[in-house]
């Protein structure tokens, strides 16, 4: 029974079916439980959290990643799967907090003040959730003071700043300066992304990394984690 | 089911209905005065026998006749011409059905070039930074051979957008003569593609051998009429307004056999036709109509295509400039004229002035391929792989052309907008707007898998460097490695027994022994 649930959970992650209403790719799964329902079912059947995460969610995402690498899957597939995993992690979050199992890390993300563009930011948030990070998305047009306040309070390991415009990218530098003034710059890795910015700009403002896209962001975060270990 | 081609629902029209009428009337005037010079006696006699005013104008070694064709003769011929032409294929799923009043486009290769362009890659190292290398394509021209023709037909068999095959390269092997060229070029083409095969004829003496070969493949005379797997293109008219002696003989004999044939004219604006659009159009239309009239007088109902290969002269050399914008304009005008007569049109695009694959060739061919397709010709001879007007063929270029024809075909798909789609859209918008992320991405997946989203350019590199040629070359070799459905062993054996002049090396079954 437990094995069946985990196998179905993995398969539904691969199919990118968040709930029973989702289409997925394989029509045979239509109307059957999705990742959300299967995660609840796994908990009801007392399947250990680690098994749900490692053998169901992470194993499924691994297959999705492989399919993406071989161009069988495209970004919409990856996002659907990541979104499904993100929803499962929301269900598991209280239990994780009560246990000793750690997530891959806490990531706060925001589009800086003056900029309302959020497609790239949202994609990063979804994929990072799917990759096992705990993501706090502050939204768009977020004031610098608000970002600093959240970093001070929730103590994330990573902060992602997004800006599309050449005018608003300057705010990223202001955020880095504000973190310095608050004495918490060295407590958090600052990553920047968006059409207007570059690796060179990241260095110029004192950010820790520039991410070209959401996949790059995952790689950068994983690299920071490994360096920390 | 025949091939679908691509239906152009609202064809681009360059000239107005009034201008179409003006060109038509001017052509009728031209056919009456000055008329055409026929260097072919039989054609002159046929015109005379059908009521045209024919006068012998020179005697001696090159006798010729002035033929003045009355309008009613032309209109009667246009009337009796089949408005639907079927071009058969070894694989019946590759049959092409062309209706003169339906702008359904089929993409076909051709024409015949003398030079085959080999492609190789050289690696260059940056002097100041030896670790940096780039691969650069090099092109090596040489005379075309029958093996090249086989390769070209083989690859075109596998190119998705190629609907039919016109031989792309003139076979110039040492053992190819005027007497065996036709049978070998038709066999090499037919044996390597299951699509329709069209070609010109080098020697009239070979016509019956070529027709017999096709009959053996499809199973007999009647079967060939039902499924004409071969057709012919003849340039019986030499501009301005002359029936050539030998090709007119060939044309008459093809018509007698009732096989599909293109009446092709290729005047050059500025030299063999007036430089102004009205002039070249009135003349080419007259020339093609004269050929069509002859076809119907020889054998009423002969399936003919209104063949137009107009071109503007280059101002620097007075050579052809197929890459010029005017050339596309003339072709579009011709498409409209053919549609006016409801006769399927053989049109031209993609012929470029560039001599090697590169930016110039891409720009010139994509421009004309797109605009001429939009006008809705039925048989678009769109020069897959041709370079330097029609002097060079490069297989790599043909593979590149297939990629942009995929884009053109996608562009012309009908717009999927209707009540069902609008209802779905409204539901989707309401759902998404209510979510925090406000993204439609989850709705992409079913659409993506239904084929409603166009594929990315197949030779896209890593976006920081241009690897188009290397990737297309790889694709070309993949296609060459894919098997083709050759003519079966028993039929091949019969063909080699019955048809003289075939090169033994073309018998794939003998080669395998």
Image (cartoon, rainbow, N blue to C red):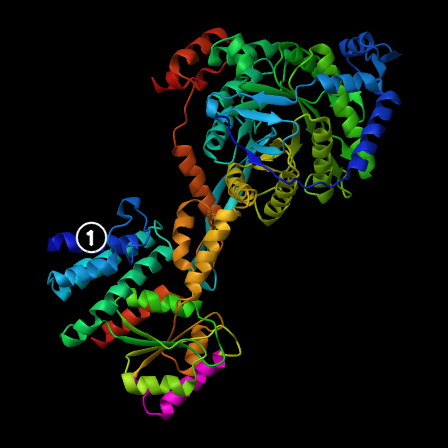
Element under disc 1: helix
**Placement of B166 over or under B466, stated as above or below:** above
- In this rendering, position of residue B103 left or right of residue A129: right
Q: Which residue is mark 1?
A: A8
The chain to which mark 1 is attached is A
Residue visible at 66% across and 13% down in the picture: B255
Whether the magenta-drawn stretch holds residue A175 is answered as yes
Please say whether residue A204 is one of the residues in the magenta stretch: no
What residue is rendered at 15% in x and 60% in y?
Answer: A42
Image point (31%, 54%), residue name: A21
Residue B191 at x, y = what percent? Answer: 46, 21
- Residue A72: where, in percent of width, then height? 34, 49
Q: Examine the image and state in which quarter residue B366 appears.
A: top right
| x and y, in percent, of residue A9 in the image | 21, 56
Tell me the magenta residue range: A169-187
Identify the image quadrant of residue A207: bottom left
């Amino acid at each position: 029974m437990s094995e069946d649930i985990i196998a179905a959970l993995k398969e539904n992650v691969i199919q990118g079916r968040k709930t029973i209403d989702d289409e997925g790719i394989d029509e045979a799964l239509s109307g059957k439980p999705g990742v959300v329902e299967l995660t609840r079912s796994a908990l009801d059947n007392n399947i250990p959290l680690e098994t749900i995460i490692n053998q169901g969610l992470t194993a499924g995402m691994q297959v999705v990643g492989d399919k993406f690498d071989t161009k069988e899957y495209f970004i919409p597939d990856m996002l659907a799967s990541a979104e499904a995993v993100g929803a499962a992690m929301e269900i598991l979050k209280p239990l994780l907090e009560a246990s000793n199992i750690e997530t891959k890390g806490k990531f706060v993300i925001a589009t800086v003040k003056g900029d309302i563009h959020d497609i790239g930011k949202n994609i990063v948030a979804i994929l990072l959730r799917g990759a096992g990070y705990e993501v706090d998305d502050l939204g768009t047009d977020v004031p610098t003071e608000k970002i600093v306040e959240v970093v001070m309070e929730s103590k994330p390991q990573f902060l992602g700043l997004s800006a599309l415009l050449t005018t608003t990218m300057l705010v990223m530098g202001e955020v880095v300066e504000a973190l310095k003034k608050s004495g918490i710059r060295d407590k958090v890795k600052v990553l920047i992304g968006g059409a207007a910015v570059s690796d060179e700009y990241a260095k110029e403002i004192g950010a820790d990394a520039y991410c070209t896209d959401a996949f790059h962001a995952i790689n950068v975060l994983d690299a920071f984690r490994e360096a920390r270990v | 089911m025949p091939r679908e081609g691509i239906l152009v629902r609202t064809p681009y029209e360059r000239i107005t209905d009034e201008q179409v009428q003006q060109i038509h009337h001017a052509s009728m005037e031209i056919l009456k005065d000055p008329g055409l010079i026929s260097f072919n006696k039989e054609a002159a006699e046929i015109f005379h026998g059908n009521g045209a005013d024919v006068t012998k104008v020179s005697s001696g070694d090159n006798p010729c006749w002035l033929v003045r064709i009355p309008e009613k003769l032309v209109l009667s011929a246009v009337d009796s011409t089949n408005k639907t032409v079927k071009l058969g294929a070894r694989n019946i799923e590759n049959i092409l059905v062309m209706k003169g009043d339906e702008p359904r486009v089929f993409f076909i290769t051709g024409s015949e070039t003398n030079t085959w362009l080999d492609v190789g890659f050289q690696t260059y190292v940056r002097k100041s930074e030896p670790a940096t290398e780039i691969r650069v394509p090099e092109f090596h021209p040489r005379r075309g051979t029958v093996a090249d023709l086989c390769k070209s037909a083989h690859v075109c068999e596998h190119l998705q957008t190629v609907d039919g095959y016109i031989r792309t390269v003139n076979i110039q092997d040492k053992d190819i003569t005027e007497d065996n060229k036709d049978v070998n070029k038709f066999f090499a083409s037919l044996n390597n593609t299951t699509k329709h095969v069209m070609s010109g004829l080098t020697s009239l003496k070979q016509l019956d051998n070529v027709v017999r070969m096709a009959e053996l493949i499809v199973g007999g005379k009647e079967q060939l009429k039902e499924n004409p797997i071969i057709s012919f293109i003849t340039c019986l008219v030499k501009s301005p307004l002359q029936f050539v002696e030998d090709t007119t003989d060939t044309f008459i004999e093809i018509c007698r056999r009732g096989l599909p044939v293109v009446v092709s004219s290729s005047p050059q604006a500025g030299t063999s036709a007036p430089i102004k659009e009205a002039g070249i159009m009135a003349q080419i239309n007259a020339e093609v109509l004269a050929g069509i009239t002859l076809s119907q007088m020889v054998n009423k109902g002969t399936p003919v295509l209104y063949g137009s290969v107009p071109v503007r002269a280059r101002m620097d050399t007075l050579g052809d400039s197929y890459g010029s914008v005017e050339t596309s304009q003339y072709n579009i005008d011709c498409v409209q004229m053919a549609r006016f007569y409801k006769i399927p049109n053989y049109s031209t695009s993609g012929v470029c002035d560039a001599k090697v694959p590169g930016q110039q060739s891409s720009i010139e061919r994509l421009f004309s391929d797109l605009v001429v397709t939009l006008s809705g010709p039925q048989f678009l001879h769109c020069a897959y792989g041709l370079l330097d007007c029609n002097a060079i063929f490069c297989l790599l270029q043909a593979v590149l052309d297939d990629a942009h024809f995929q884009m053109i075909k996608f562009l012309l798909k009908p717009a999927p907008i209707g009540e069902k789609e609008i209802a779905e859209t409204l539901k989707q918008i309401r759902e998404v707007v209510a979510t925090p992320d406000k993204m439609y991405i989850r709705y992409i997946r079913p659409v993506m898998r239904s084929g409603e989203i166009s594929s990315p350019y197949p030779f896209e590199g890593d976006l920081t460097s241009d690897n188009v040629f290397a990737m297309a070359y790889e694709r070309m070799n993949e296609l060459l490695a894919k098997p083709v459905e050759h003519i079966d062993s028993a039929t091949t054996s019969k063909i080699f027994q019955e048809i003289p002049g075939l090169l033994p090396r073309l018998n794939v079954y003998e080669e395998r022994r």
